[in-house]
């Protein structure tokens, strides 16, 4: 956002050097916090300048702009964002204006002079729209940008709605196995395309699925072919917030670019920082090796099926023990066919659902259980509708 040059005699200058964007900015938290942090740094520089130069020129500060007498170089107009929700767009703009006013007051306290805030002369460029459908160059040209940052939406590959699935197909047109990519992967691809031929750094907070399992060879093999490399990585941490009902989301932060390495890559793991030679897609110091799925096992072992994925339209699953007991009261003969059923949700809560498993039931037993037969017919009906 701005660079502080070294001190040479009494010369120390803050210079404006580009901009940053958050292409999934929500209410502008990332942009606001970045602006506040950089302005606090700028105020430190201004204080140093003021201490060195105060008293040298009567009635004005010589390092300030000659036309406005304003020493501030960093502006919210250097910040760009894209957000699909219209209310969040308004909140983001307002938050940046409030931050600007707050930091201007701190600068006034440093230089002991009044700076005009009103009428508003600056504006953060927060654009309303679907970041995966609009051209980011229409928001800000790559030649004017230094950084891309943000935390795109956390939506799992199996949890996306139809519109989100279409976004994935649009971004990864022609790619294979897209069904294993989470929604956040789209921002990695679009950012990688945008920074081609430009010295722009990207840092995204995302679910750790982008560095695990099937997603790694699908996403990163192609990105690495396009000259992307990882500059730094924060390994898995739990997303925290002040909300009473906290989401159990495990995240990573991956910084990447297409520029030449300025410094050696760094891996952050809890309190530990490691300077490494290379960071691969699994966020370890190792060559770029990809573990891909196989259609056949390595040795002579039984094939694995689809596990306990329920495809019965809910006809054989009972949410609570009470539901199961109510059914058994109607159909006592079915009691021996009930079993506890655990998926990830049930395992975490240690509270099973119950499955009516009729795989070992003989035809004669089925005929004696009309309520079970009704559920079998319901499953057949749901398949015919598909």
Image: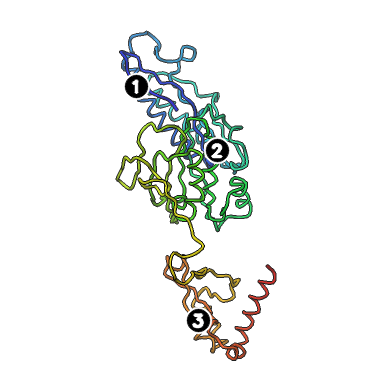
Tag 2: Cα neighbours inside 10 Å, few (<14), some, or many (≥20)? few
Tag 1: Cα neighbours inside 10 Å, few (<14), some, or many (≥20)? some
Q: Position of residue 166 (x, y in %)?
A: 63, 50
Q: Which disc, if any, is residue 161?
A: none
State which mark lies toward you, 3 or 1.
3
Up the image or down, 169 lies above or below 30; here it is below
Tag 3: Cα neighbours inside 10 Å, few (<14), some, or many (≥20)? some
- Viewer-closest of 279 and 380: 279
Read off the residue under disc 2. 193
State which mark lies toward you, 2 or 1.
2
Q: Position of residue 245 (x, y in %)?
A: 45, 56
How far apart are labels 3 and 1 at the CA level?
74 Å
Task: Name which residue lies at 35% across and 14% down.
Answer: 11
Task: Name which residue lies at 51% across and 86% down.
Answer: 335
| Earlier residue among tags 2 and 1 | 1
Up the image or down, 80 lies above or below 164; here it is above
Read off the residue under disc 1. 47
- Viewer-closest of 180 and 177: 177
Read off the residue under disc 3. 338
| Earlier residue among tags 3 and 1 | 1
């Amino acid at each position: 956002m701005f660079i502080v040059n070294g001190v040479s005699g009494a010369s120390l200058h803050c210079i404006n050097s580009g901009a940053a964007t958050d292409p999934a900015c929500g209410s502008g938290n990332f942009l606001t916090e970045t602006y506040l942090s950089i302005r606090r740094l700028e105020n430190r520089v201004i204080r140093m300048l003021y201490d060195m130069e105060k008293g040298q020129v009567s009635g004005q500060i010589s390092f300030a702009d000659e036309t406005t007498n304003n020493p501030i170089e960093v502006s919210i107009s250097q910040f760009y964002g894209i957000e699909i929700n219209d209310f969040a767009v308004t909140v983001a703009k307002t938050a940046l204006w409030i931050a600007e006013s707050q930091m201007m007051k701190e600068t006034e306290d440093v230089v002991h002079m009044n700076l005009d805030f009103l009428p508003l002369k600056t504006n953060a460029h927060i654009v309303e729209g679907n970041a995966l459908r609009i051209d980011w160059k229409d928001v800000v040209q790559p030649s004017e940008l230094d950084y891309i940052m943000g935390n795109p939406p956390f939506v799992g590959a199996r949890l996306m709605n139809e519109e989100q699935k279409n976004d994935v197909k649009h971004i990864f047109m022609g790619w294979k196995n897209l069904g294993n990519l989470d929604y956040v992967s789209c921002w990695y691809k679009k950012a990688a395309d945008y920074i081609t031929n430009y010295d722009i750094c990207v840092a995204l907070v995302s679910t750790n699925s982008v560095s695990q399992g099937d997603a790694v060879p699908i996403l990163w093999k192609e990105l690495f072919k396009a000259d992307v490399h990882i500059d730094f990585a924060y390994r898995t941490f739990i997303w925290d917030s002040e909300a009473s009902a906290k989401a159990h989301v495990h995240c990573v932060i991956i910084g990447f670019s297409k520029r030449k390495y300025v410094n050696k890559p760094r891996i952050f793991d809890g309190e530990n920082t490691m300077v490494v030679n290379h960071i691969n897609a699994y966020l370890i110091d190792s060559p770029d090796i990809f573990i891909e799925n196989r259609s056949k096992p390595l040795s002579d072992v039984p094939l694995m099926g689809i596990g306990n994925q329920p495809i019965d339209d809910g006809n054989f699953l009972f949410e609570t023990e009470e539901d199961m007991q109510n059914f058994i009261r109607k159909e006592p003969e079915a009691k021996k066919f009930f079993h506890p059923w655990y998926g990830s949700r049930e395992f975490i809560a240690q509270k099973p659902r119950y499955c009516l498993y009729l795989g070992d039931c003989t035809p004669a037993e089925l005929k004696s259980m009309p309520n079970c037969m009704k559920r079998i017919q319901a499953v057949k009906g749901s398949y015919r509708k598909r």
